[in-house]
Amino acid sequence: MDRRMFVAAAAVLCLSPAMAQEKVKLVNVVELSGAGATAGTNWKNGIDIAVAEINAKGGILGRQIEIVHYDTQTNPGNTRAAVQRAIDEGTYAVLGPVFSGPIGASMQISQRAEIAQIVGGEAAGLTKQGNPYLFRTSLSQSAAMPKIAAYLQNDVKAKTVAVVWVNNDFGKGGRDAILPELEKRGIKVVADVSTEQGQADFASDAIKVKNANADAVFVYLNEEESARFLRAAKQQGVDKPMVGETTLLGAKVIELAGEAANGVKGHVGLSIDAPVPAFQEFGKKFQQRFNYASDHNGLKGYMAVYMVKWATEKQKKFDKKGLADTLRGARITPKDEPGIMIETKIEQNGDLDRESFLAEVVAGKQVIKQTLPMINP
Amino acid sequence: MSDIPSFTGNVPSPARSFWRRTDGVLITLLVAAVLLWFVPAGMGRYGTYVLSLWLVTAIAVMGLNLTLGLAGLKSLAQAAFMGIGAYATALLTTKGGMGWLPAFAISGLLTFAVGLVLGFPALRVKAHYLAFVTLAFSTLIWLVLRNEQWLTGGVFGLSNIPRPTLFGMKLDGHLAFHRFVVVVTLILALALWWLIRSPWGRAFLALRENPVRAASLGINIRNYTLLAFAIGSAYAGFAGALYAPLVEFIDPSPFALSASFFLLLMVVAGGSGYQLGPFIGALLGVVLPEYLRVTGGLYLILFAAIVVALLIACPQGIMGLLERGWTAIRRRPAGRNLPVKESAL
Amino acid sequence: MAEFIAYLIAGLATGAIYALAAIGFTLVWQTSQTINFAQGEFVMLPAILILALVKLAGAPFWLAAVLGVALFIALFGWGFKITIVDPMIRHGVLPLAIATMALAIIMKEGAKDGFSAEAQSFPSLLPAQTLSFMGISISLQHIAIIVVACVAIGGLQWFVTRTRTGRQMQAAAQNPGVALILGIPVARMVMLTFLINAGLAALASVLISPIYLAKFSNGEVIGLFAFIAAIVGGFNQVRGALAGGLIVGVIDSLAAAYVSTSYRLAVPLVLLVIIILVKPEGLFGRKEERRV
């Protein structure tokens, strides 16, 4: 009896400091309400899946991850507060946010604290400010758009293009990135149509595109607006090729747009339909747990956690500054870290380089036509 | 003018006597300012930042409290005015190379002028039409801030907004800047306190208590209402001028229509018409969410539910509840008159 | 010209959506002289409720639709009147208006946290067929919305002016004191208005969601446009909502076509300001007496 108690007490004594030491805190600061709520929720869910996986397999270097999500309301002032709080609370790295406004408001804070901030933003300008602690989780728009422009020129053989974009930081950033690329290739933009997030009806935009009579239409909208635009375009009888980036070809768009999505083509970066088994497997896990299909932000959030895991195991310690130093200039392959899913090269400025795909929607399915190599392999 | 609703219209107006004995308000303000000067010393960057954000929001709510609580006007553009002030200050101090103080003054003057221009035609028609006009104005301002990228940075916002240097003192650090915010907030609160005790403010109270009689005494309702709206808007401009260097970054989202609604909810939650109400309201709107941040999006529901519950139970907000509670306590030792303390929160 | 007509038709179709949502503004205004800032969310929520019943409770769609609409009318017609309107109206109209802003937040965040942050497709009662002639196309769904909006407003107009209950309802709205003296059950009439309001919102929701998709944030845009429509058309007349909605829809469509797509929202707003300054009761509204 005595001995059993002694053993128990000894076990508790031995375990408790280890338990306390075991958890590593990660704070995710992301848009859970306001204009970015949909993107932010996907990002958060992706993170939750990754954290659950890693913890189930024993954590990072034997320590469990404690994940905390802070809502930013898609508001820069609140984002700054949340990131500051995350740092004051001793987060190992800051994950998020996804919208570039909130990222711009908070990136100096993690830079000052010398803590890595792994974000979901795609706007080109973010990595041009010389912040060595900022890391992306997807291709920047200035990397993706040349691929689209080349596709329009070489495969679609378009001389004129109508550009339809959503007037938020995502859409505006993409539009600003593709216009010079089109110009460089001698493709004329005959209609430049901005739409509002959550717009009630896309009929007049579709009519405008139809009347522009361009050789192709470049659509750069969020998933649900993509679907609604495609339906409106079909209704108005727009019969020109619809070309887009990741968000136009996703499963969500195909589900919502139905037949109208057939024939849509374009460039796909992160997508649960891409011909990478790990992507598809993630898509299944996500569907199973949250009962809907993940968009690219879910994949980004998932990878963000694995970037932290890989770099920590690489440096073999929990050093905040070292984490950023390890990530900078790194090349992560799925062989080293299956959770990264696809070979990823991190540039010195935090941009990423990866393979990507050209795809087409055929009979309600995304079909990959070609794999595009990394820009600087 | 039944369209100018007054919260205290049906109740035997606790507010009338409340505005009169403002000494308690004065003492509270001064004591609170001293406390806020010293409190954050051990709070770290995050706590200090939240306190500063609270005060900056309270300035905008103070202005709206004047518009709503005193003049009974629904303005749905307080956040838009804050945006005008924030962008004016940001542009003047970055691209314009101007010091913070003149930029602050210009932000206030600009929003005051815009308030006059906006309010004049709207109030000419009917008081509650101001709500409609400000709703349109709010959305228009948001569109301009988003679309005119050459000036405002568009959806990507303006970054690297400098914190002020005043009289050779650099207010860069979080503590120095917080203390600076405390001083500015105190000055603005005192100005409002004085304003309400001035003949102008007294005329206003008369007008609110009994518009018909006030009009017969020669008070020009429209001019007074308009002035209240313009001053309220100027306070939003001042708040914006502090918000920009506090966050060091601005984009259009915190100045959208929904933010104006939120400010209005803070006025009501704190206690519309009470001078200390805005501080309580902003506390609920800014500091409470920080405590509940872990709950994800749920705290918004919680905040909104608190406002609804307050409106049902006590439309005078938390200040009204406190006052009610105080009156109940005071009534017990009947006849004794306690002059000052009750407004001292 | 064909192009212009195409824009016009597209605008009318969208305008009918706004009109349907705007009726609620005018109904609530007439009975309680207040603005329901949650009107957009009133149109957003029924579709979400129905989908939630399908997905979470596994009900077949028709049953979910019936239950969802009934639940919505009970909660946001009867419940809204009892818990929000009744206790607040005696404090004046301002607290009520502000309470609806808070209610909007609760409904929106509740739909997001309780159901989904994603847009959901919503089954249509009509085939997604398109009628085309001379290069102008319009879908059956849009035509249905226009027809239903006209019928709903016409029916309401008929009900209010031609039936005994309707006339009592209007009397109760216009002068509750006198109505009470005349023996009209004012409280019951006001309740009826709120039930009709909730029912129409649910109808609008079911019609709009196949096109618009069901999403928690839909109320913001619908609410704003319906609000503009109600002011332009006239807050105190149900027919004003129809006219206002169609006008705003057409203007929005033409603005996107001929002014600027990034400022398209500005044009209806400028129109709103002009209307307020020139004809504050709205284009089709009745001049309101000043009541001291």
Image (spheres, helix red, strand yellow):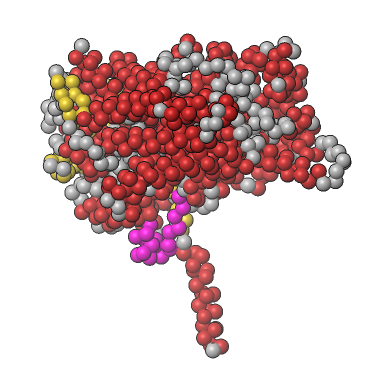
Q: Which residue is drawn at the image coordinates 74% and 13% (left, top)?
A: B217
On screen, residue B10 versus residue C16, left or right, reads right
**Quick check: can you spot residue B82?**
no
- Quadrant position of residue C141: top left
Q: Position of residue C251 (x, y in %)?
A: 34, 17
- Quarter of the picture holding the N terminus of chain A: bottom right
Which image quarter holds the C terminus of chain A? top left
Residue at image location 52% in from the left, 41% down from the top: C82
Farthest residue to the right: give it.
Answer: B336
Tally of marks: 0
Please say whether residue B268 is visible from this viewpoint.
yes
Nearest the eye: B89 or C34? C34
**Which residue is drawn at the image coordinates 73% and 27% (left, top)?**
B193
Which residue sits at x=47%, y=22%? C236
Q: Nearer the viewer, residue A136 or A73?
A: A73
Snapshot quadrant of residue B157: top left
Residue C221 place in picture, x, y as percent: 39, 30
- Magenta region: which residues? A51-76
The reply, left or right, for residue B311 in relation to residue B80 is right
B133 relative to C262 in the view: left or right = right
Q: Is residue A65 magenta?
A: yes
Asked if residue B324 lies in the magenta stretch, the reply is no
